[in-house]
Amino acid sequence: MEQNLKSLSHLKIVIVDKTSRILYVEDDETLSFITTDNLTRKGFEVVNASDGVEGFKLFTNNNFDICLFDVMLPKMDGFDLAHKVRSVNKEIPILFITAKTLPEDRIKGLLIGADDYIVKPYTMEELILRIKVFLKRKNVVNSKSEENIITLGSVNFDKDNLTLLVKNKLNNLTYREAELLMFFIENKNTVVTRERILNVLWGENDYFAGRSLDVFITRIRKYLKPVTGISIENKHGVGFIFKVPDK
């Protein structure tokens, strides 16, 4: 098995389905081989890298639909890699695959701009489901419609291009930020519970999901800070209310 893996180590790109292209950066050769094999069997195109520097080079020279990054990488760790990716692309979904389980480490990744985490050891079914969820959200957000731009006073939210224009300042959103903002807009001026948000958007209601929600709410609040009358208010012990002035 080890010999077979070494003979395949020079292969960097496996092409199966050009519609779903994944950048997968993992230094564990065995895990990388097994995961790539499973993903390609499910119809994804996978581009592999074994360190952060190589991963960023591949990212800048190719187009991808989603990024899968291990955290503990040689030359450049996953956190730094995600930071560099976000500096040039605010929209692409980034999913960390990591053995790190401390909430502080996972929150650090979200603050950098990651969209989600999956913790080792993971099942292939779980990983593939997470990937499909983000790709589906990507397609939904990017689908064209006549109502793709939502205007709230001096705020313009472009659902297709994942941008939020606030008093002439353009903010590029991640998919998770856009998804959460859309949820609040759909439920504006109504109290929504934390449990409902977590179950609808995260699919689970646990400690880490709750901390993740707080991170994304903080981001959106920062974007909306220059605007008077639009805010996300805490309802202690219940949830949140997205306040928007009546027309």
Image: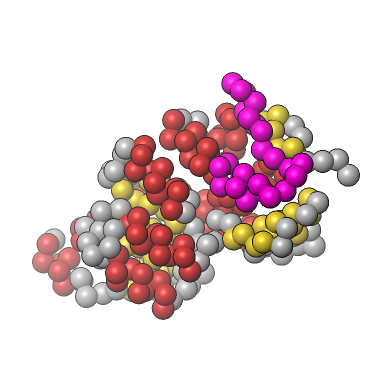
User: Disc count in the image?
Assistant: 0
The image quarter containing residue 165 is bottom right
Decide: is 104 above or below 136. Answer: above
Given the current orientation, which residue lies at the most extreme top position? Answer: 237
Q: Is residue 212 magenta?
A: no
Report the colour scheme: secondary structure
Given the current orientation, which residue lies at the most extreme bottom position? Answer: 61
Q: Is residue 235 magenta?
A: yes
Decide: is 147 above or below 228. Answer: below
Quadrant where the C terminus is found in the figure? top right
Q: Position of residue 48 (x, y in %)?
A: 32, 68
Evaluate whether residue 19 shows in this view: yes
Q: Residue at x 33, y 57 (%)?
A: 78
Report whether 54 appears left or right of 109. Answer: left
Q: Residue at x 12, y 62 (%)?
A: 2
Evaluate whether residue 136 shows in this view: no
Task: Out of 16 and 247, give the one closest to the viewer.
Answer: 247
Decide: is 220 above or below 166. Answer: above
Q: Position of residue 12 (x, y in %)?
A: 29, 73
Quadrant where the N terminus is found in the figure? bottom left
Task: Out of 154 and 7, give the one closest to the viewer.
Answer: 154
Q: Residue at x 54, y 61 (%)?
A: 91
Q: Residue at x 46, y 30 (%)?
A: 206
Given the current orientation, which residue lies at the most extreme left position? Answer: 3
User: Magenta segment range?
Assistant: 217-240
The image quarter containing residue 83 is bottom left
Q: Position of residue 26 (x, y in %)?
A: 28, 60
